[in-house]
Amino acid sequence: MKKIFLVILVCVCVGCSGTNIQLKNSTMPNASGINYLIEPYQSVGILETENIRNGNYAVYQGIFPDLLFGEYSPGRMAWYGLAVTTDGQEFFVQALLSGINFAGYFVETVIVEGNCEKIKTAKIIILSTLVEYGYDLLGEEIQLNRGQFLMQNDYRKEIALQKGTAVSNLEEIPKSQLVNLLSKWNRFQSPKGVLLTPLGNDEIKLIAGINPQYTYFEKLVGSGKFSVSMDPITMVSAMAMDMLKARSVPSVGWDYNSQIPTRRNMAFIIKQVLDMKQQLLQKTNRYNAQLIRKENE
């Protein structure tokens, strides 16, 4: 029986310029469209939308695009995306950076919201923070005309159907696995609704200290219900937090519209990503060795 491990990395908050990136003319439930700009507090979890609450979604796994690590800074886990059917129906996608697979690739857990039967006929793309690029679920990049993508549903349909990954080619992850995962996460009430996150108060304070621009995090501290669990997500989250505490972290925040301030900050991001990958590989190897020993007993 194939086992799917959702190893969620503790992730990164990235600063934002406050600009709205509103998807217009969408067939999504919200008639006014949806804002695709992920604000700092949204980057460390997923939005508990009505579809998430009611179980109207499907879950898949893809290869996390290496180029999206250009948007990574200590703490982020979430990116948004879009799924489109041949008749132009659109579905909101939330993608979570989810550790590595046995081949050593970083992977993402992809949550497609909407009618599960209709989702099966759609194609998926993941979007960069400023909707300048898209990515299929093999991590291949697609350059976008942001203005057309945000305003013209015909353009979105063309891009998704030509470049996106067909849901029919993906193996669906049992929804119960995500439900079990989210039940152990914390809930924070934000201006845009409830945010589900594996981070606790101390971790949020730590990230807020690393990125002093992100003052909104300070408003979240103390408003969540923190639960303790020994599931793999908590262990990997603790590992990432230990890594942040163990070294000198640049005290300058990152902004969506700016480049990384210094080469040292860029080197810090690269080093943290490589360290996380190495530690995850070591944990995976130890886990596999334990499985082999049990099978041989």
Image (cartoon, rainbow, N blue to C red):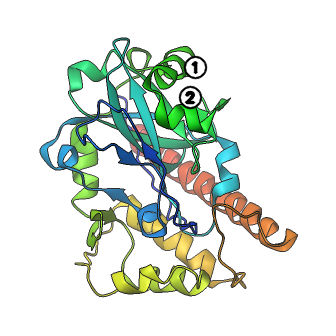
The residue located at (34%, 33%) in the rendering is 26
Q: Measure the C-alpha gap from mark 1 to mark 2.
A: 7 Å
Q: Quadrant of residue 51?
A: top left
Label 2 amino acid? Answer: Asp
Label 1 amino acid? Answer: Lys
Which quadrant is the C terminus positioned in?
top left
Q: Residues within 10 Å of mark 2 (few under 14, many from 20)?
A: many
**Which residue is the site of mark 1?**
163
Question: Which residue extends farthest left?
Answer: 54
Q: Quadrant of residue 105?
A: top right
Q: Residues within 10 Å of mark 1 (few under 14, many from 20)?
A: some
Question: As displayed, is residue 214 above or below residue 2?
Answer: below
Question: As displayed, is residue 195 above or below residue 173?
Answer: below
27 and 207: which is toward the camera: 27
Query: Which numbered disc, 1 or 2, marks the residue that appears first in the sequence?
Result: 2
In the picture provided, is 271 more to the left or to the right than 236? right
The residue located at (38%, 15%) in the rendering is 168
Tag 1 near tag 2, CB within 8 Å: yes
In the picture provided, is 253 more to the left or to the right than 120? right
> In terms of secondary structure, where does tag 1 sit?
helix
The answer to whether any part of residue 231 appears in the image is yes
> In terms of secondary structure, where does tag 2 sit?
loop
Residue 239 percent coordinates (x, y): 53, 71
In the picture provided, is 143 more to the left or to the right than 81? right
**Which residue is the site of mark 2?**
136
Total residue callouts: 2
The residue located at (39%, 72%) in the rendering is 199
